[in-house]
Amino acid sequence: MSRKMNGCTVTNGYNLENGPCLPSKNGFGCNNDHSASCNCYKRTRYMDIDCQSYTYEDIRETSGFLLQKTKYRPEIGIICGSGLGSLAESLTEKQYIPYKEVPHFPVSTVKGHVGQLVFGMLQGVPIMCMQGRFHYYEGYPICKCAMPVRVMKMIGVNYLIATNAAGGLNESYNVGDIVVIKDHVNFMGFAGVNPLRGPNDERFGPRFPAVSKAYNAELRAAALKIGKEMGIQNSLHEGVYTCLGGPNFETIAELAAMKVLGIDAVGMSTVHEVIVACHSGITVFAFSLITNKCLTTYDDDDVANHEEVMETAKNKEDVLKEFVSRMVQHIQKIGGK
Ligand SMILES: O=P(O)(O)O[C@H]1O[C@H](CO)[C@@H](O)[C@H]1O
């Protein structure tokens, strides 16, 4: 079926001459004629509709905009998971920048993800915090979900603290526990859904990055030590996380399969951010808050739901703020500013 979109004829979502026809970006990058001189054309001519990566220049435009807007020059970035936006509230001298004001940025559509950047100080350290992240199930291509990590890097961020809400599949986990992520299984990547898919611009990182050490060992060890100091060692674990496409929670059979594969915590985020961080040379620390137990038998009366996820996150707010704050202090000690 053909129709007109942004001045070009689109057939089943494609402008047959120039590749997918992107909506106007409010003057950023697209001049709407979709000719060879148009960034939309340049960005998409080699790619299919699911892989409209941002160019280096796009990311420079976004980071340039932010650097102009804020006096902060953070080396540490934090991504707040579902219901964990309050982590950003620990910052002092806060400056809020809504995503909708930032060129090229997606907007948040999920309950529990405010949709703004928060710049400020934590433990005397400048921080850039995402109060709201992007998930594949929202309809964004996976490279778009991970794009803010490239922006962080260009702003000067060298350490990423990625947080998420996750279901606990490991039977020893309880609701409210913290899992320091030591590794992930990229299920979506098995099917080719990877934020690095598409032409590689070496200025972002190498074509074939190693991700076997994605979750920094020194920071993981520090987190376990901090947990001990806080007296939460019995509810603190190290484990393997996986990201599924969502938005539905998992079936019993899917969970049974994942258990066999050694997965401890199940979510719908983080992996794409960590891959892009790793690609761009950012040191990663990530953890899950276990917001619900994965239900693995057919006779369970309960079912997973987002309200429970949000409620658990709210209940653990204070301990998580303390945990993150101590991690920031540690990172500053070992080299972050
Ligand atoms: O991973 P975060 O963003 O913390 O959110 C998790 O919680 C939501 C489901 O309740 C999903 O978005 C899942 O990914």
Image (tube, rainbow, N blue to C red):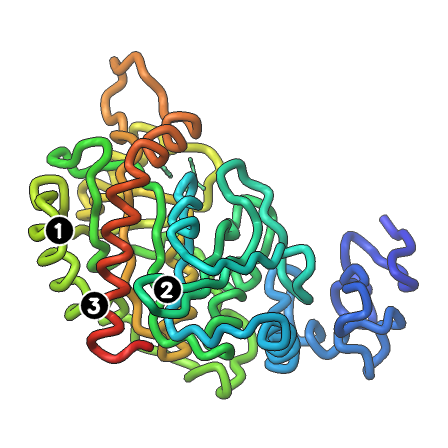
- Under tag 1, what secondary structure? helix
First in sequence, mark 1 or 2: give its number: 1
Query: Which of these two is toward me, 156 or 293?
Result: 156
Q: Which residue is mark 1?
A: 227
Q: Position of residue 122 (x, y in %)?
A: 35, 61
Q: Disc 3 marks which amino acid? A: His
Residue 30's place in the image compared with 88, above or below, is below
- Under tag 2, what secondary structure? helix
Q: Position of residue 322 (x, y in %)?
A: 25, 50
Q: Is residue 118 at all visible to an observer of this figure?
A: yes
Q: Position of residue 103 (x, y in %)?
A: 68, 66
Are the residues tagged 1 and 2 within 8 Å (C-beta)? no
Residue 245's place in the image compared with 13, above or below, is above
On the rendered image, what quadrant is the C terminus found in? bottom left
First in sequence, mark 1 or 3: give its number: 1
Q: Which residue is mark 3?
A: 330
First in sequence, mark 3 or 2: give its number: 2
Nearest to viewer (mark 3 / mark 2): 3
Q: Which residue is mark 2?
A: 274
Q: Please name the residue shown 12% across and 43% down the image.
A: 232
Quadrant of the rendered image containing residue 252: top left
Quadrant of the rendered image containing residue 11: bottom right
Q: Disc 2 marks which amino acid? A: Val
Nearest to viewer (mark 1 / mark 2): 1
